[in-house]
Image (tube, grey):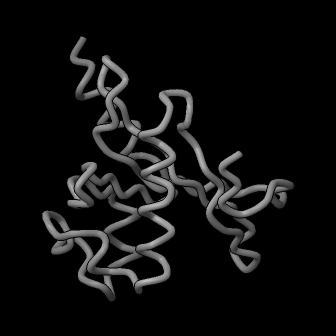
Amino acid sequence: MNMEELFRSILEQDTAPIVVCAADHTIVYMNPSAKERYSKRGGEALLGKKLTDCHNAESNAAIERVLAWFRADKSHNRVFTFRNEKENKDVYMIALRAPSGELIGYYEKHEYRTPEAGKRYDLS
């Protein structure tokens, strides 16, 4: 059984957009839903570009704060970033780690569900 194929299939079949970035903010993967969702911003052409080039200064500062928090402790792996009422979803940043625990990247996770009870960007 090829685990890479299995994991890729999980990502490819997810209906929520998944954008995976290396720790330096390079976009390394977008599932089909993400390519479609971000088509007006370039879609698949965003691969290899910096996520920070797609955001304003305030958003980039928030991303950097989260990455610093991820790096501060191996147990820091998930942060609520915003609620989209129109789509009834909460969005999170999730740390991606090497087996050693080193931060190697991150991705944005969309969860369609009842509203998040926590505070935005609560790093405590």
The image shows residue 97 at horizontal and vertical percentages of 36, 31
Q: Residue 60, image x and y in percent?
A: 41, 74
Between residue 92 and residue 44, name the one nearer to us. Answer: 92
How many numbered marks are there?
0
Horizontal and vertical percent for residue 34? 38, 65
Residue in view at x 38 percent, y 37 percent = 96
Is residue 90 depicted above or below 7 in this figure? below
Vertically, is 124 above or below 34?
above
In the rendered image of this protein, does residue 49 appear above or below residue 122? Answer: below
Q: Along the horizontal axis of the image, is 50 left or right of 109?
A: left
The image position of residue 59, as x and y in percent, is: 48, 77
Report the quarter where the N terminus lies.
top left
Taking the view exactly as shown, the residue that stands out farthest to the top is: 1
Asked where in the image residue 39 lies, by quadrant, the reply is bottom left
Q: Is residue 114 left or right of residue 94?
A: right
**Residue at the image position 31 percent from the left and 18 percent from the top:** 100
Residues 12 and 121: in front is: 121
Q: Nearer the viewer, residue 91 or 69?
A: 69
- Image quadrant holding the C terminus, namely top right
Which quadrant holds residue 117?
bottom right
In the image, is 86 to the left or to the right of 68? right
Residue in the picture at 41% in, 55% down: 18
| Residue 112 relative to residue 63: left or right | right
Q: Is residue 35 above or below residue 28?
A: below
